Image (cartoon, grey):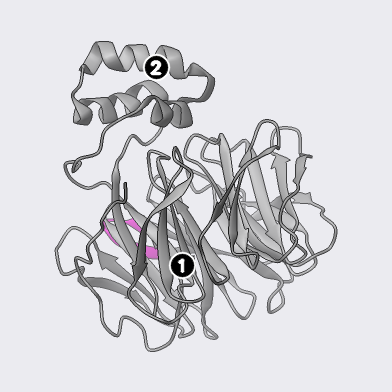
Amino acid sequence: MSKQYLTTHTIDDAHITDIFSLAVTSHQVISASGSSNIKIFSTTEPDFPLVQTLEAAHKLGCHHLASSQDGRHFASAGFAGDVKIWRCEDGKWLEKGEIVDGNKAGEIWAIALSEDGQYLAATSVDGRINVWDNLGGHSKIRQYETKGSFGMAIDLSIDGRYTTSGHENGGVYIFNNDTGRLQHSLPGLVKPVRAVAFSPGGKLLAAAGDARVIALYDVASGEQVANLTGHGAWIFSLDWSDTGEYLLSGAFDGKAKVWSIDRRECVATHTETDKTLWSVKWLPKTGRSEGTESTPADIALLCGAHSSKVQGQIKQLCGDNTDAAMQAYKEVCGSAGQTVCKLSMGM
């Protein structure tokens, strides 16, 4: 059975050039483009008004954004090699530092922030993965080596245990941040990998790119567990729903697809534009869930090995009350028990 998503609002002329990246918080969408400004839109009002513009944030434009799970920090990477850290104070975003490490244009590409915004991970043109401590003077604390291929995508698991990267040669790597060592070198993709994303519970990893296939991997074993096929163009962006039930993807041909992880199939396709969707994001839940039911699969994704115990606790606490179950996810698992709203933005 397919799902239907309706366009609720379109922000025309949000930027004067292509939008390359989006980041979200619980009540805002942050967007970046080939222009020097970063813009912040509110999601608490139906018309998504512009609430702040960070002028001249990156003189040559910005290609990547990354927000922390707590919604208090985001990082931006510019085409000049500059990387800035931003923090929300009293409702306004302020620049709080810059990564200065002999950066040259293109040397730092994809970026990811830890749950609390303390750590920034980034790929480089020569395949290195670097990690900086934003609270420790923006000092580099770790460096991972790969086979030297351009790092095109990166993600950090919500619990901070793993870093993953996708590369131009088709390589996908998972590093264990506790040991500082390579955990898995993953098979299955032989063309450039432009997007990687851990599931909310950290059990699955999605990777995609020029192969036009989304590969799903088991993080613990490194085994490929599924291929999601249906895109007819390069895939540029991936984003998991808060429950891990659905995966959102955006492609070069302007199509956004929603995938059911349980059924391993596409359940919705959107074609709002024929231009490239460089970035797609789900909006965190801001109101009452609409027709979304909790399932044992959702609990397993959120809670891992503790799913049986958690499922019993949630049943005891909530019965069949979905909203209460989502809150119980949060209380019992310590993970964001939120259902999904949907936003995909292109140009």
First of labels 2, 1 by sequence position? 1
**Label 1 Cα crowd, 10 Å radius (few <14 / some 14-19 / many 20+):** many
* Neighbours of disc 2 within 10 Å: few (<14), some (14-19), many (20+): many
Residue 9: assigned label: none
Q: Is residue 305 above or below residue 10?
A: above
Query: Could you say where residue 188 lies in the image, as x and y percent from the top left?
Result: 72, 51
Numbered disc 1: secondary structure: strand
Residue lying at 30% horizontally and 17% vertically, measured from the top left = 314
Q: Position of residue 119 (x, y in %)?
A: 58, 48
Q: Are marks 2 and 1 in contact (CB under 8 Å)?
A: no
Residue 130 appears in the picture as rendered: yes
Q: Amino acid at mark 1?
A: Ser
Q: Which residues are magenta?
A: 88-94
- Judge whether residue 89 is colored magenta: yes
Q: What residue lies at 28% left-to-right and 72% top-to-bottom?
A: 52
Please, what is the three-letter code of the amino acid marked with disc 2? Val
- Which residue is denoted by mark 2 in the rendering? 310
Element type where label 2 sits in the image: helix
Mark 1 sits on what residue? 279
**Farthest-out residue, bottom:** 16
- Above or below — where is 196 with respect to 152? above
Q: Position of residue 72 (x, y in %)?
A: 38, 51
